[in-house]
Amino acid sequence: MTALTLSTAAVPGLRADAIVIGVAKGSASKPGAPVVAPGAEAVDEAYDGRLAGVLETLGASGGEGEVTKLPAPAGFKAPLVVAVGLGAQPEKDAGYDTDALRRAAGVAARALAGTKKAAFALPVADAADAGAVAEGVLLGAYTFDAYKDRGKDAKNGKAPLGEAALLGGKPRDKAFKAAVERATAVAEELNRARDLINTPPNDLNPEAFAAIAQAAAKEHGIKVQVLDEKALTKGGYGGILGVGAGSASGPRLVKLSYTSSKAKKHLALVGKGITYDSGGISLKPAGHNETMKCDMSGAAAVFAAVVAAARLGLDVNVTGWLALAENMPSGSATRPGDVLRMYSGKTVEVLNTDAEGRLVLADALWAASQEKPDAIVDVATLTGAMMLALGSRTFGIMANDDAFRTAVHEAAEEVGEPAWPMPLPEHLRKGMDSATADIANMGERMGGGLVAGLFLREFVGEGITWAHLDIAGPAFNEGGPFGYTPKGGTGTAVRTLVRLAERAAAGDLA
């Protein structure tokens, strides 16, 4: 993990391998002309105030994600200046958007892979800006190379940026220090979630995931309970058992409990943890299963959020439920047409074994409901339909309470995670009526993401506020990296869940 420090050192004398500065797109009066952002005054002065012109000559425009490298001015200890685009210049007296700073820092950190130390002289007006830059650096510098040869003759890529000095901050200011400490805790846990998502399924089955959760819980003072096949059978968790029935790796339900003596609210988080999804007997076609190790992204997000809450010492009780199973076809697998008796006592006719996420979540939602939390949020890579609706970078939010859905959406916007509120149309519920069981696990094809949300709602305890995050789109990035988002597992929803926990601690859950 990249080391972070707050520094007040003068830029020219700072010993580093590179100085990162911000550059924005010019105003309407000077379209296309880049503008040097605050924080880079010393660099601009060393260029006799002509840095913007130099950057323009090199083709820089200040566009978001743009990186321009140039030699540092004479007299600087650092040999390189890296100008990173911030996008449109803000209106007069308005600061830069925190997520623009986060994205720029992430782009720069990734561009500086193989570098030992870089100084970030981006515009920092307050502690929130410092936290955003710190988070962007740590998330952008992420790499997953656990399965690559890292010997001295290896040619499998460069090591991540070693150290980042954040300029413009105030190392002795409590607010700045707290912002960087928060950014570090959240980013480190989000990157842990990314590691889990990227781990091949032959090494991350439900038992292995549970063991990792147990180790982290012990390290951070979190109470943990793991239900194996015997305990799940004794408890009547028919959904989790039904999904895991076809695999040689048995399912698990992991409960993580972080408690605070000052807590006045209890937030329950439920994550879908299908460590590999073949589709079961309803086998996925070729080309649709190569990345299905990511189907446990919801559980990874919940795990990371609970640990982050513990590391931050938030004054809220947070319980995480990880519903872990591997969905495989075999002679013992659940068949289309089978009926499962869920933990809630309801029966479900399984019409499609590839609609398995809602089955494990149903059991975990009912288990979470028994503790009567103030709110439940589930997170899942649940439906391809949500990807069709919202694309690959935005997750959908459904809820049984409009105010809470709005609160979740606000939390996502605050941390820079693209999300969109979605409805739960009552007329779609009828499509899941079954002649054999209480409910079927499939309904109308059109609006499939909303149908899945309606199914989950059936397993939320009466009177409990609940929201469902369908992260199928942004959970796994199959394209190139952008901003602070890498290729592969993204850790989406972790920051939204942490912000929700913070809001709950402040008495602002909805």
Image (tube, rainbow, N blue to C red):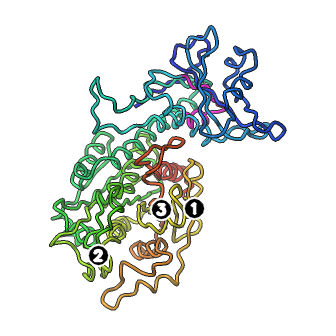
Q: Which residues are magenta?
A: 119-133
Residue 420: assigned label? 1
x, y percent for residue 45: 72, 16
Front position in the image: 95 or 411: 95
- Residue where numbered disc 2 is placed: 342
- Residue where numbered disc 3 is placed: 469
Locate the N terminus and report the quarter of the image it occupies.
Answer: top left
Q: Is residue 197 above or below residue 117?
A: below
Say whether disc 1 or disc 3 marks the residue closer to the N-terminus: 1
Residue under the point 67% across and 25% down: 39
Is label 2 or label 1 in front?
Answer: 1
Q: Is residue 278 above or below residue 50?
A: below
Residue under the point 33% across and 65% down: 364
Callout 2: SS? loop
Front position in the image: 203 or 52: 52
Say whether disc 2 or disc 1 marks the residue closer to the N-terminus: 2
Residue 459: quarter of image: bottom left
Task: Look at the image and say whether residue 56 sits in the magenta stretch.
Answer: no
